[in-house]
Amino acid sequence: MPRPDRPRIMCVANQKGGVGKTTTTVNLAVALALHGNRVLVVDLDPQGNASTGLNVPHHAGVPDVYDCLIDNVPLAEVAQGVEGIPDLWCVPATIDLAGAEIELVSVVARESRLARAIAGHPAEFDYVFIDCPPSLGLLTVNALCAAQEVLIPIQCEYYALEGLNQLINNINLVRQHLNPTLEVSTILLTMYDRRTRLADAVEQDVRNHFGDKVLQSVIPRNVRVSEAPSYGQSVMTYDPGSRGATSYFEAAQEIAMRGVKESVGRNV
């Protein structure tokens, strides 16, 4: 897959839980890393599911993203290489992160702690994926301040559209007051069940509303995608031939190609 001409920092956000944020983060990161890109995953969810999916230790006592946010520990000291995938690193999240939301309230420049940590990393990454918690609190605001792009996974069910307005409003507020370069660049439809009319109706609604931002690739409901984390793997390595893996590969390819087109447009 082509490499972008500058690092792309993507925040994977949606305050609704269970829409596939972590699954999307892990599988896109693995797909891009397996095909020639240097990728960093920052797990910003206290549940630590992205760390689990990449088989990175995140039990109590392991240095994690909490240390970077609260104690200014350099990100390079916390990032761990992902076993079996040479160009992929992960900054894990432990249960300590659950308290960070409260502790950050009294910290100076609390919204930009993560942005400074990423900017201070000496290595050059092609992609940085930030996996957000299912809320619109200070951790998500930190992710939005650190990113240039927002990737929103949308589950193909009616309730998935309900909280979307609130998320877009929050992104606009962050753009106005904290991070003027932020934009919603990518919408990915997940858990798509071709047997239902509802999935088709939701897809049409999302495509009509967001236009070109919606990837052509759609992630189907797939048992292999759900099974992979229990083996500490992404579906890309667990079952590369499954529909879930090929769909995530196509989505990663689309994201990579869009990045190249944008850089060509800028140079022109």
Image (cartoon, rainbow, N blue to C red):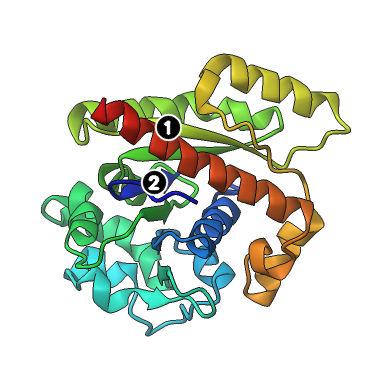
The relative height of residue 265 versus residue 42 in the rendered view (above or below) is above
**Which amino acid, mark 1?**
Ser
On the question of residue 15 being in view, the answer is no
Residue occupying the far right of the picture: 195
| Image side of residue 4 versus residue 51, left or right | left
Q: Position of residue 84 (x, y in %)?
A: 54, 79
Q: Which residue is mark 1?
A: 185
| Image side of residue 57 versus residue 199, left or right | left
The relative height of residue 146 versus residue 72 in the rendered view (above or below) is above
| Image side of residue 49 versus residue 124, left or right | right
Quick one: SS at disc 1? strand
- The mark nearer the N terminus, 2 or 1, is 2
The relative height of residue 83 versus residue 105 in the rendered view (above or below) is below
Q: Position of residue 127 (x, y in %)?
A: 38, 54
Q: Position of residue 173 (x, y in %)?
A: 28, 27
Q: Quadrant of residue 204?
A: top right
State the residue at coordinates (57%, 51%): 24
Circles 2 and 1 in contact, beta carbons < 8 Å = yes
Taking depth in this image into account, of 174 and 35 the one nearest to the observer is 35
Q: Quadrant of the C terminus?
A: top left
Number of other residues with Cα within 10 Å of mark 1, as a class: few under 14, some 14 to 19, many 20 or more: some
State the residue at coordinates (48%, 75%): 82
Residue occupying the far top of the picture: 208
Q: Which residue is mark 2?
A: 10
